[in-house]
Amino acid sequence: MTSLPTPHSTHPPVKAILFDLDDTLWHLAPTLVKAEAILYDWLNEHIPGVTQRFSNEELRELRMELLPTDPQFQFNVWALRHAALTRACHLTSENKDLVDQAMAVFSVARNTVNPFVDVTPGLASLSERFALGSVSNGFADLGEIGLASYFQVSIAAHQFGSAKPGAEIFHAACAALNVAPHEAIYVGDDPKLDIQGAQNAGLRAVWMNRFDHTLPDHIVPTASVTNLYELDAWLKRA
């Protein structure tokens, strides 16, 4: 573990911990690959014209084409996927009324994640001493995943209406937990969205570096950890 000074050395005590979800509490890439494969199989059975026209990669390209066409797509990945499938149905003269069913299939698969081994015991330990919340640009459902009981608040960008790195979503989570930004730390893997975003919003930021990445020189988190055990140990050194 690489960390800077102890969390309370020059700051007020930590009262709340906010977490990113994807690639912080579970590995996103294999989850998405599996979910997209499950969806594609469903499309092949129920909306075959789409799979005859588009490969999975081409469906991703269609999403990228649509991304700049609506401001909400920047923070609402569910809406972007829905719009891309609707567009694919239109282009293939298929029944777009089945898109909601398709998205339900995808959502179930998207929430079938495998949390890292430290996550459940780590959250259990941390929740005994801190208020916990989550702030995510994705649309994972902690209730479906089975981790909601550890969190007092969970804010997703697609429901909130704006996304990280904007300060508003961090401030909303702090307000929901009744703490000031300087009394909270944010834990996430993305240098810009999580570290810079949280710091610009007045929170301390802990980089979750599970995959041995390197930060840009200009981004300096309050601490760097590789799992929740290290985060817990860092917080105890007060």
Image: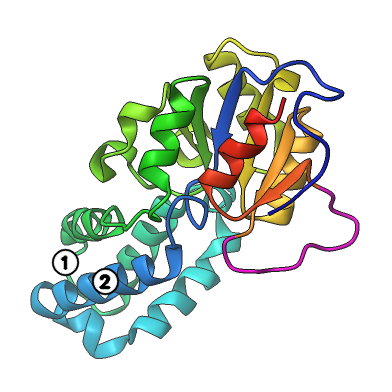
Q: Can the viewer see residue 163 in this picture?
A: no
Query: Does 12 sit left or right of 85 as displayed?
Result: right
Q: Nearer the viewer, residue 214 or 170?
A: 214
Q: Nearer the viewer, residue 112 or 161?
A: 112
Query: Gap in Å between the C-alphas at discs 2 and 1?
Result: 6 Å
Indicate whether 42 appears above or below 120. Answer: below
Q: Residues within 10 Å of mark 1 (few under 14, many from 20)?
A: some
Query: Does 166 sit left or right of 41 as displayed?
Result: right
Residue at left 78%, top 62%?
Answer: 215
In the rendered image, residue 203 lying in the magenta stretch gets the answer no
What residue type is disc 2 on?
A: Cys
SS at mark 2 in the image: helix
Query: Does 230 sit left or right of 158 as displayed?
Result: right
Image-quadrant location for residue 189: bottom right
Q: Quadrant of the N terminus?
A: bottom right
Main secondary structure type of the part rendered in magenta: loop
Q: Residues within 10 Å of mark 2 (few under 14, many from 20)?
A: many
Q: Could you tell me if the residues under marks 2 and 1 are in contact, i.e. CB atoms within 8 Å?
A: yes
Q: Nearer the viewer, residue 226 or 159?
A: 226
Q: Can the viewer see residue 211 in this picture?
A: yes
Q: Which residues are magenta?
A: 210-220
In the rendered image, residue 217 lying in the magenta stretch gets the answer yes
SS at mark 1 in the image: loop
Residue at left 39%, top 52%?
Answer: 78
Q: Quadrant of the C terminus?
A: top right
Q: Which residue is mark 1?
A: 95
Q: Earlier in the sequence, mark 2 or mark 1?
A: 2
Residue at left 61%, top 61%?
Answer: 68
Q: Which residue is mark 2?
A: 89
